Structures are given as C-alpha cells and as structure tokens.
Image (cartoon, rainbow, N blue to C red):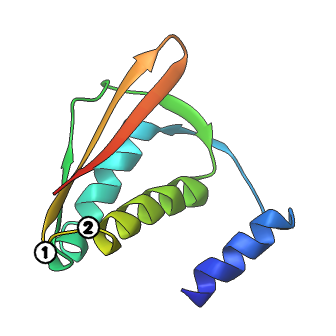
C-alpha cells in the first residue's frame, strides 16, 4: 500500500517515468487475468473476460497499464458488498479507439 501511495505521489508531481510502447491490450489483459488466476478468487472475486476484439494495439506504458488493471480489480475485491463477486472485462473498438468495460456484479 505504501508503495502504491509513493507511486501516486510521484505521478502527481510528474516524476514518474512514463515509457509508452505499442501493446496488444487484449493480450495484456488476458495475460494479466491468467497471472492473477489464484490471487483474486482467494479474495472472493471471479474475473471473466470477453467478448473482446482479436487484437487492439494501444500506446501505453506496460507498468502503468498493469497498475490500472490491478487498481480496478483490487478495488472490486475490496469494496464488494457480498462475500463473493464477479468482474467482467469486455472491450470493443470504435474506429481507432479501444473501449474497455470493467463491470463488477455481486
């Protein structure tokens, strides 16, 4: 938690290194969910993905992108109102934009 607060402080001050790369956002999300397959169920949170575009290339810093996903899922686990909950991550493209939907249900 202290590490996250320190990171947010650095970001607010503009002192956080941001190194964007071309990423396949769908692959990043799927890999992230697979890597978290044991962590979130222990917290009573099931994560579902899909439907998604086959590929969606974005310009983003991989560490920042993973931090955003972690923050969304950590908050979903922490603030669920029942003992268990589900988060669905879906996406679609709209022209050159990728629209991601992260929805928590109880």
Could you say which disc has been placed on residue 61 in the image? none
Q: Is residue 93 left or right of residue 16?
A: left
Image height check: is 95 above or below 80? above
Q: Is residue 16 visible?
A: no
**Residue identifier under label 1:** 83
Label 2–label 1 contact, CB within 8 A: yes
- Residue at 12 percent of width and 69 percent of height: 84
What is the crowding at mark 1: few (fewer than 14 residues within 10 Å), some, or many (at least 20)?
few
SS at badge 1: loop
- Residue at 79 percent of width and 72 percent of height: 10
Say which quarter of the image contains residue 33: bottom left
Q: Is residue 88 left or right of residue 3?
A: left
Provide residue 100's location: percent of width, then percent of height.
41, 35
Q: Nearer the viewer, residue 24 or 10?
A: 10
What is the quadrant of the N terminus in the image? bottom right
Q: Nearer the viewer, residue 19 or 98?
A: 98
**Residue identifier under label 2:** 80
- Residue at 30 percent of width and 45 percent of height: 103
Q: Nearer the viewer, residue 27 or 50?
A: 50
Q: Is residue 11 visible?
A: yes
Image height check: is 77 above or below 54? below
Provide residue 70's location: percent of width, then percent of height.
43, 64
Provide residue 47's location: percent of width, then percent of height.
20, 56
């Amino acid at each position: 938690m202290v590490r996250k607060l320190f990171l947010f402080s650095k970001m607010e001050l503009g002192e956080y290194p941001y190194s964007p790369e071309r990423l396949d956002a769908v692959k990043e999300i799927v890999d992230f969910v697979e890597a978290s397959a044991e962590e979130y169920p222990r917290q009573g949170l099931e994560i579902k993905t899909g439907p998604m575009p086959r590929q969606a290339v974005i310009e983003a810093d991989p560490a920042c992108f993973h931090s955003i996903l972690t923050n969304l899922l950590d908050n979903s686990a922490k603030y669920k109102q029942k003992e268990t909950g589900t988060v669905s991550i879906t996406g679609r493209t709209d022209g050159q934009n990728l629209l991601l939907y992260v929805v928590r249900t109880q």
